[in-house]
Amino acid sequence: MHKRSLRYALLGQQGLTIWFTGLSASGKSTICYGLEDELLQKGRLCYCIDGDTMRKGINRDLGYTNKDRSENIRRLGEVATILTDMGAITLVAAITPFQMDRNTVRSMHERKGLPFWEVFVDCPLSVCEQRDPKGLYVKARNGEIQQFTGIDSSYEIPENADITLHTANTTVEQCVELMLTKIYCFLQQGECLKSIE
């Protein structure tokens, strides 16, 4: 804890993990990268961990079985705790479909005394399918992709999200502004969290 305090003092900020969960094409990564850009421009150390990118790197050995999905999330959680312990504002964009796995990464942070916010990027499946930038929903509907979250694999609605962003009727810019307000409140006062509904 003493070394963590020294790191935070050097950076002039406290570490924080913000975990964005939601269906594919709900807006998680877009919001994360937008938030990262704003924070970096304002001189804040932050890093965006994108679940898709990680699957091409340290998680490339994992498939899409429930067991592999859980291991994928566990690894993302471990990386997030390291960055947050260092003092970064760590932004994670990962579907994280199962409540058990979301609880696991929250507990992982709590055990280490690290702040953790779960953000539910709430967007109806129908809207996500209309967006479908990678054509994944079409492939899943045609049977070309198996175990696709929202189609033939379930997404469990978060039970205890700290913040909910409704991206069907809120722009990316509005979501980023809402998150920036919460983050600056946290950095200035330690903790200031009320659900955004």
Image (cartoon, rainbow, N blue to C red):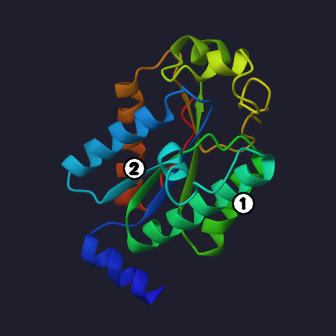
Residue 30 pos. (x, y %): 41, 33
- Residue 9 makes an appearance in the image: yes
In this view, the residue in front, 188 or 111, is 111
Residue under the point 34% across and 84% down: 6
Quadrant for the C terminus, please: top right
Which mark is on residue 183?
Answer: 2
- Residue at far front of view: 144
- Residue 124 makes an appearance in the image: no
Residue 142 pos. (x, y %): 71, 15
Residue under the point 45% across and 66% down: 84
Above or below, comparing residue 63 to residue 31 in the picture: below
Q: Amino acid at mark 2?
A: Ile
Q: Quadrant of residue 145?
A: top right
In this view, the residue in front, 11 or 34, is 34
Quote the CA–CA distance across marks 1 and 2. 23 Å
Which mark is on residue 104?
Answer: 1
Mark nearer the N terminus (1 vs 2): 1
Q: Amino acid at mark 1?
A: Thr
Tag 1 near tag 2, CB within 8 Å = no
